[in-house]
């Protein structure tokens, strides 16, 4: 005796074998994500080379040894004061923006991976409960109690997400760049 009609057991293996090798996705980052990371890294390094996080003064005197340094003066020796001010203005923006993007990308990628693992664990646990209940090893599951636990868990997760949002917006130097980094890190590679 079969549980399912014969038509359910028939599968089209030809279509799967033709599609599977061509459609196979490689694990890792997409090309656009790699480009975004390289741009953020170059931006961070460029900002640090131009003056870091604003720790050096833009108008270093000509007698100081820092005036001959590319990083300290924000430009090449002998550059006009206007070029030094422009480099001094862009240095913190580039460094902080790029660093915020990189850090937020890592956080977004880690959250996406953690959610995948969480969803897999919850799905496997649900399948185990359903299977054990179907096999008769478990009695009646009290779904109303599980609903209460779910509501408590959702409220706790909402509080944690609000705290995380406050932490990220307060700690990252550039909220816009950080938000973009979170989005790019959280998105799928395809």
Image (spheres, helix red, strand yellow):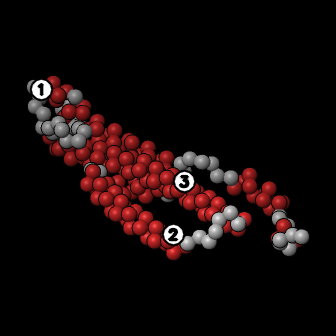
Q: Residue at x 51, y 52 (%)?
A: 113
Q: Is residue 58 left or right of residue 175?
A: left
Name above or below for residue 50 compared with residue 65. below
Residue in front for this viewpoint, 187 or 71: 187
Query: What whole-number distance in Å separates the C-alpha atoms at marks 3 and 2?
Result: 21 Å
Q: Residue at x 56, y 60 (%)?
A: 122
Q: Quadrant of the N terminus?
A: bottom right
Which numbered marker is on residue 146? 2
Residue at image mark 3: 117
Residue at image mark 1: 64
Q: Earlier in the sequence, mark 1 or mark 2?
A: 1
Q: Residue at x 83, y 65 (%)?
A: 11
Residue in front for this viewpoint, 142 or 71: 142
Which numbered marker is on residue 38? none
Residue 60 x, y percent position in the rendering: 13, 33
Q: Which of labels 3 and 1 is toward the front?
A: 3
**Residue 175 shows up from this direction:** no
Q: Earlier in the sequence, mark 3 or mark 2?
A: 3
Query: What whole-number distance in Å separates the C-alpha atoms at marks 3 and 1?
Result: 56 Å
């Amino acid at each position: 005796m079969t549980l399912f009609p014969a038509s359910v057991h028939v599968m089209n293996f030809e279509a799967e074998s033709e599609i599977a090798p061509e459609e196979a996705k490689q694990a890792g980052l997409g090309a656009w994500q790699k480009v975004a990371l390289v741009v953020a890294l170059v931006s961070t390094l460029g900002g640090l080379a131009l003056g870091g996080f604003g720790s050096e003064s833009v108008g270093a005197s000509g007698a100081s040894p820092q005036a001959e340094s590319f990083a300290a003066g924000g430009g090449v020796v002998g550059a006009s004061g206007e070029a030094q001010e422009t480099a001094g203005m862009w240095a913190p923006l580039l460094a902080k923006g790029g660093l915020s993007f990189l850090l937020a990308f890592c956080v977004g990628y880690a959250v996406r991976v953690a959610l995948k693992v969480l969803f897999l664990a919850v799905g496997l646990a649900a399948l185990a409960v359903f299977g054990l209940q179907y096999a008769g090893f478990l009695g009646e599951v009290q779904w109303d109690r599980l609903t209460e636990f779910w509501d408590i868990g959702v409220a706790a997760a909402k509080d944690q997400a609000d705290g995380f949002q406050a932490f990220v917006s307060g700690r990252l130097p550039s909220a816009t760049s950080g938000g973009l980094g979170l989005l790019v890190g959280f998105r799928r590679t395809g």
